[in-house]
Image: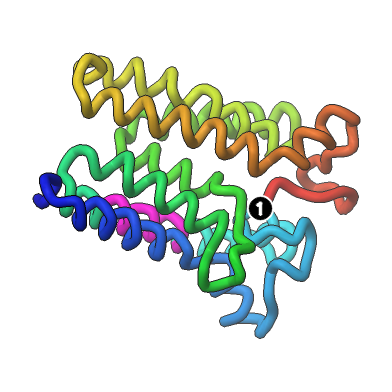
Amino acid sequence: MFASHAWAWVLAFAAAYLCGAVSGSIIVSKLFYKDDIRKHGSGNAGTTNMLRTYGLKKAAMTLGIDFLKTFAGIAIAEWLLGDMGYMIGATAVTLGHAYPVYYKFKGGKAAACMAASMLYLDWRIFVVEATLFFVCAFATKIVSISTLLAAITFPVSVWFFCNEVMGTTVGHSYLAYTIYICIFVFYLHRSNIGRLLNGTEARFGSKKGKGNE
């Protein structure tokens, strides 16, 4: 652990960002179809757009890559910085996913990376948030509103399940990340929010409108 060195913080952030900038959807679409997922559907390099465009198997591959890169980015940051590495790594990965240097800074909306960061932190948080997501998705058939629900309840779940460290610097860093990712996900979904407000957001299974990712 090298948390006392400034270079370690810079390296942790840079390494996690570069991990996050690896786009599962772009890799899968180019590998299997010699195509770029960003040319289809919503234009976003994300799991939902992969599901709508290429189906469940390719979406699952995309999700798997995005989870692995998130775990890798956070693990590297934790190796360099210790407990504070979670906040730095998770933040950098989500920024890399949304603005990937490898793909002209046009990426996805960080939903998969947010979910992966939940699982990395505590499987119970992931189970609760995944349940909320799928119940909302089943009820509304709108992926974006389910993602926003997960984002806004993430800080509450962390407060509940990580309560024993909430009075410490580490606990504060967890909450800081959850507040950041909530704001960031809402920002990345601002066009979806506009469509939700005017009633034109696509429902799952519909060919009309634009999807979440």
Q: Is residue 38 above or below residue 66?
A: below
Nearest the camera: 2 or 98?
2
**Which residue is rendered at x = 69% and y = 32% of the image?**
145
Residue that protrudes farthest toward the bottom in the picture: 34
- Which type of secondary structure does the marked residue at label 1 adopt? helix
Start and end of the magenta stretch?
Answer: 65-74
Question: What amino acid type is highlighted by mark number 1?
Answer: Thr
Q: Which residue is mark 1?
A: 48
Nearest the camera: 183 or 4?
4
Q: Is residue 38 above or below residue 6?
A: below
Q: Quadrant of residue 98?
A: bottom right
What percent of the width, then of the height, locates residue 146? 64, 32
What percent of the width, then of the height, locates residue 53? 74, 64
What percent of the width, then of the height, locates residue 30? 61, 80
What percent of the width, then of the height, locates residue 51? 67, 58
Q: Is residue 158 above or below residue 63?
A: above
Is residue 73 magenta-colored? yes
Q: Is residue 10 left or right of residue 111?
A: left
Nearest the camera: 72 or 8?
8
Q: Is residue 97 above or below residue 120?
A: below
